[in-house]
Amino acid sequence: MAAAYINTSLPDVSDRMLFAVPKKGRLYDQCLGLLNNIGIEFNRKPRHDIALVSNMPIALVFLPAADIATYVAKGNIDIGITGLDIIRESQTENDVAELMRLGFGKCKLQVQVPVASGHVRTAADLVGKRIVTSFINLTRQRFAELEGVADPAQIRTQVRFVSGSVEAACGLGLADGIVDLVESGDTMRAAGLHAIDTIVDTESVLITNKAPRFPRLADTIKQRVEGILTARRYVLCQYNIRRPDLERACHVTPGRQAPTVTPLEQDGWVAVSVMIEKRSLADNMDALKDVGATDILVLDIVNARA
Ligand SMILES: Nc1ncnc2c1ncn2[C@@H]1O[C@H](COP(=O)(O)OP(=O)(O)OP(=O)(O)O)[C@@H](O)[C@H]1O
Ligand SMILES: O=P(O)(O)OC[C@H]1O[C@H](OP(=O)(O)OP(=O)(O)O)[C@H](O)[C@@H]1O
Ligand SMILES: [Mg+2]
């Protein structure tokens, strides 16, 4: 259970759901965009890590992404956004409920070595060597597997923690290899490194405590986020078609549930309105044209509720 926040200079948040958001870093901008999209209004004062939401009984708590899973697992925070990598690293998988993957913050936690150390081709070649990382638990678990040791504390490989700029460690002589996140690979390549093993594929997730204090409010947040993710994934497509060609057109664009078909004033014609996934839009438009559709229009969806 989340405890009341005990600090008299802070606002009273005892009746509010505490919602943790990364206070900086790679997830920050995306999280703020999402909060805005789901209609959460707040005013964060400079240097304050708590902001009251003006239109819902929620208080936002801005925390380092790496700590959010622990707060949620312990029940000090009710709901939060963080990365799957962080949940695994903080060993909180069994204590948090994953409500939804959010589709951003996608990257891989990888074992990397200097391109120049050509004799190191697999992670097994680093057994017994020096590894630097911000993910010591996941790194120790991976090397325990490679060493055939049940207890990660017993591994021969030396795993040392650094809090950031991990990619500098090999060049500076502190490590023979590193374990760090890779998205585009630019950071890795700029440091003269390449990846030889993947430990985790990660993306950001919405999580709650397993015994949430505000289950209905958490569900409302989940539904609103689902609506935004759906809106981002789909467009609304409208077209006109002769009734005899409708069946073939509906085959191309079956929609999420079913297309909406409306008769046109012109005899024998109908208008179709249907949701289409953005990633198959161009192919679907080509196929619609082939089956006789005309006046094909595509409209952005701002929000949705399935
Ligand atoms: N390059 C990236 N691409 C996508 N997601 C990333 C990337 N780097 C980190 N993440 C995700 O964001 C989470 C938080 O990492 P991030 O580096 O943003 O936080 P931080 O280290 O607290 O911030 P900073 O690096 O600014 O000090 C990671 O655990 C991961 O889930
Ligand atoms: O493959 P890329 O697209 O280059 O992204 C990967 C980099 O992003 C993160 O670093 P961040 O910017 O958070 O800096 P940090 O190392 O100081 O945490 C991560 O730690 C990598 O260094
Ligand atoms: Mg970082």
Image (tube, helix red, strand yellow):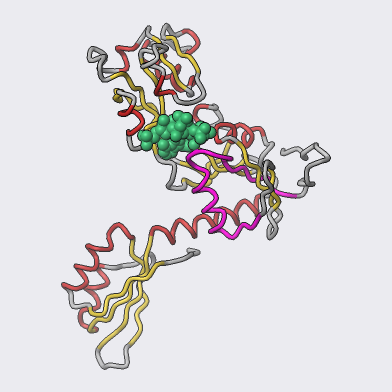
Q: Quadrant of ligand 2?
A: top left
| Image height of 30 relative to 130, above or below | below
Where residue 189 sits: x, y (%)? 30, 28
In the figure, is residue 10 to the left or right of 85?
Answer: right
Q: Which residues make up the magenta segment? A: 16-42
Q: Residue furthest left?
A: 290
- Foreground of the two, 48 or 61: 48
Where residue 78 sits: x, y (%)? 65, 43
**Measuring 36% from the left and 12% from the top, which residue is drawn there?**
176
**Considering the image in quadrants, where does the N terminus appear?**
top right
**Measuring 29% from the left and 84% from the top, which residue is drawn there?**
270
Tell me the quarter of the picture where residue 281 sits: bottom left
In the figure, is residue 291 to the left or right of 221?
Answer: left
In the figure, is residue 95 to the left or right of 124?
Answer: right
Where residue 18 sits: x, y (%)? 68, 45
In the figure, is residue 30 to the left or right of 106?
Answer: right
**Measuring 48% from the left and 23% from the top, which residue is drawn there?**
134
Determine if the magenta segment contains residue 88: no
- The total number of labels drawn is 0
Residue 85 appears in view = no
Where residue 63 sits: x, y (%)? 61, 37
